[in-house]
Image (cartoon, rainbow, N blue to C red):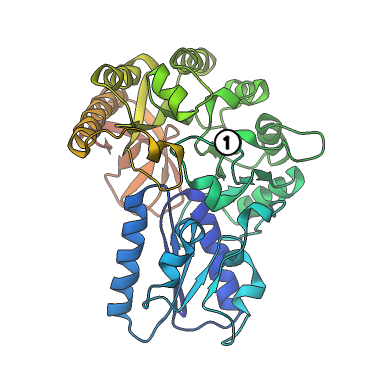
Amino acid sequence: MSVEVVTFGCRLNAVESEVIRRNAESAGCSDTVVVNTCAVTAEAVRQARQAIRALRRERPQANIVVTGCAVQTEPQTFAAMSEADRVLGNAEKLSTAAWNAGDDAPKSMVGDIMAVKGADAHLIDTFANRTRAFVQVQNGCDHRCTFCIIPFGRGNSRSVPMDAVVEDVRRLVANDYREVVLTGVDITSYGADLPGAPKLGALVRQILRQVPELRRLRLSSIDSVEADADLLDALAGDERLMPHLHLSLQSGDDLILKRMKRRHARSDAIAFCAQVRRLRSDVVFGADMIAGFPTETEAMAQNSLDLVDECGLTHLHVFPFSSRPGTPAARMPQVARDVVKERAWRLRERGALALARHLDGEVGMTVRVLTESRDTGRTAQFTKVLLARPAEPGLLLDLKVAAHNGRQLLAA
């Protein structure tokens, strides 16, 4: 393959990597490796730099292009890397002009992401090595959580027009994708910048109504405080909207949530999960949680541990707090690194117990599985299943659950 894209981070990056691949190939790039970076933590940036150095050792003659959120937030860092031939910002990586700029173009092309207006549909037909398709509905974020660098990598919130999203989904379904995932940076802020300010729920209902042949519609991470009535009605009334919500919770302590500049309280998270569970009894919740946020005490950390049970969380993503230069949280009193790591470990252990309880409840049940590879698949609740017999990727199969191994279900 003349163009290879190495993707770090979120599902939105996965969408954009396909656009990058298409644009680079159309521009005639050969022997090119594009590293699409993530900046959500300092560790993500470190891993990107490590990967770039390794790629240069392995492929000394390749043209290495580095892009993504880490480049947008730290352009000088990556421009200074001798291993990188070109450095493109988040807007430039999606621009055909940047890929056609030629040999005379400057090494670093990183513009002002805050000046970018609007979001376009990417019109992707296929996703390499994936059995579910991702559709970008929104980009950027207008919120300023004190720990988060991402708005400075992605810019302000901007939405893809509803008709364009529906057409994108329709085209992917016509290309035999059985599941589509709506993705963005803050998808529950969808539509605020569009005429009439439609909300995410209206978009979801429009997709379900206008693309009846779509078998599965899934949402990426949502902010529960922004979930609108139409979204909850769609979840309650249409089984094609998957009963799996991944919530941006971050903490279970009210004072820490306030210092994070989050817009929900602990009680809001608990009430939301209870409300959704009443509407859709088979729903499961995932959540992002940060361990060791500055000023966090042991009692505050315990509140986060308890929230796992009180919300009935199943799939937990735990992040040890990572100080990002330029954010307010970086200037707050820090928790010792060994304490941060220990609290993250405890949160992960609590998450493992919660997942095991969910897996226990699935044993003996028949579940519908979308196969991801010849050996694995995912249920509607996004639970991983190990297949008993090889199957073609991209199939929807009804399988009996024989057991589990603590991490995934085992099909009979």
* Residue extending farthest right: 195
**Which of 217/255 is in front?**
255
Q: Is residue 405 left or right of residue 358?
A: left
Can residue 114 be seen here? The reply is yes
Q: Give the image location of residue 410, x and y in percent.
A: 26, 37
Above or below, 55 relative to 334: below
Q: Give the image location of residue 175, x and y in percent.
A: 60, 57
Residue at the spot 32% in from the left edge and 78% down from the top edge? 56
Quarter of the image for residue 334 reads top left
Residue at the spot 70% in from the left edge and 31% down from the top edge? 199
Residue at the spot 53% in from the left edge and 73% down from the top edge? 108
Above or below, 69 relative to 51: above
| Badge 1: residue crowd in 10 Å (few <14, some 14–19, many ≥20) | some
Can residue 283 be seen here? The reply is no
Secondary structure of the residue carrying tag 1 is loop
Name the residue that disc number 1 marks: 143
